[in-house]
Image (spheres, rainbow, N blue to C red):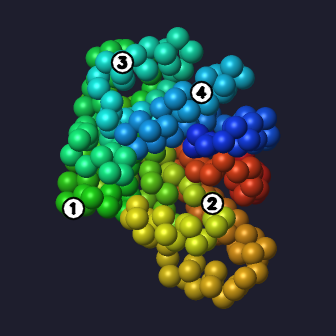
Amino acid sequence: MSTISFEYFPPKTAEGRAALLEKTTPALQALDPAFFSVTYGAGGSTRDSTLGIVEALCAQGIDVAPHLSFGADDRDTIAALLQRYRDMGVRRLVALRGDLPSGMGSAGQLVYASELVAFVREQTGAHFHIEVAAYPEIHPQADSYDSDLKFLKRKLDAGADSAITQYFYNVESYFYFLDQCAAIGIDKPIVAGIMPITNFTNLARFSRNCGAEIPRWICQRIEGYGDDQESIRQFGIEVVTQLCQTLLDSGAPGLHFYTMNQIEPTRQIRNNLGL
C-alpha cells in the first residue's frame, strides 16, 4: 500500500511558525500522512529552527522526520542532535549531503550522505528509519547518470532504508530510474517526490537550479493562461493529480509532497486521489 507524507521548511518568523503549527498542520494531519519531514538549511543554518519545529510536532504526537546533514557541523554536534531526537521519540530521519551556506567556500566541508548514514548507524544502531535522496533526472552536480545511481546505492548499502526522489513531472523518468536501480541491485523502496504547482515563476527558477525538468507542454499551457491565476491553479492541480494517479496505479511505494508550508493545493490533490 502506498504511503503519503508531507514536507515542511522551518518558517523564518514567529507568525509563520504559528500558522504552520496551528493552522497548516491540523489540516494536513487530517489527511493521515505517514509522517512530516522538516528541512535543514545549508550547512545547518536552520538547525535550531528545525529542531524547534520537530519538537513542536512531536509534542502534538506527530511522526516527524528531521532532515539532517553534516554541512559545517562536526560529528560531536551531529551526535548530540541525534541524541536530542532520540529523547524526543523521533524514529525517522532524512539523511542528506546538504550544501554549504553561500560565502562559506572552502571553510566548510561537504560530507557524502553515505558517510552520514554510516555515522547515524554507528551512533544509534537500528533506532532510526533513514531516508535518503534520489534523483530520477540526475543530480545537477553528478558526473553522469550511472555515477549518480552508484551514489544512491552507496547510501542504501551504508544502511539507509528507503529513498525519496527529487520532484519530477516526466513520469517516465521515474519508471526508467526504477528499472536502472533494479539493474544494479537496488531493491529498497524509492518514494516519488511531488511538487504541487503554485507559484510557477518561482517553480521554474528553482527547477532550473535543481535539475528538475518541467515539460514544454506544461510551460506552454501555463503561459497561455497569462495572468489568470485561478486557471493556472486549477491546471496545476489537474496535472499533478494525474501524475500522482499514474504513479499509484503503477505501484509507487509512496508520494512525498513538498508542501511549501501550504495547505492547498496539496490537500485538494490528496482528496482528488481518494486515498
Q: CA distance from mark 4 to mark 3?
A: 17 Å
Question: Does residue 23 appear to the left or right of 89 in the view shown?
Answer: right
Q: Secondary structure at mark 2?
A: loop
Image location of residue 43, percent across then percent down = 37, 39
Three-letter residue code for mark 3: Ala
Please state which of residues 6 and 100 is positioned toward the viewer in this rendering.
Answer: 100
Q: CA distance from mark 4 to mark 2?
A: 26 Å
Which residue position is annotated with label 4?
Answer: 52
**Label of residue 144 in the image:** 1
Residue occupying image coordinates x 73% and y 70%:
233
State which mark lies toward you, 4 or 3.
4
Specify few, some or many for label 4: CA neighbours under 10 Å numbering under 14, 14-19, or 20 or more. some
Q: CA distance from mark 1 to mark 2?
A: 28 Å
Q: Secondary structure at mark 3?
A: helix
Which residue position is annotated with label 3?
Answer: 79
**Given the current orientation, which residue lies at the most extreme top position?**
87
Q: Are marks 2 and 3 in contact (CB under 8 Å)?
A: no
Answer whether residue 185 is visible to the viewer in this image: no
Image location of residue 124, percent across then percent down = 37, 15
Q: Are marks 1 and 2 in contact (CB under 8 Å)?
A: no
State which mark lies toward you, 2 or 3.
3
Q: Which of pointers 4 and 2 lies earlier in the amino acid sequence?
A: 4
Residue occupying image coordinates x 55% and y 66%:
203
**Label of residue 40 in the image:** none
Q: CA distance from mark 1 to mark 3?
A: 33 Å
Image location of residue 100, percent across then percent down = 33, 45
Which residue position is annotated with label 2?
Answer: 196
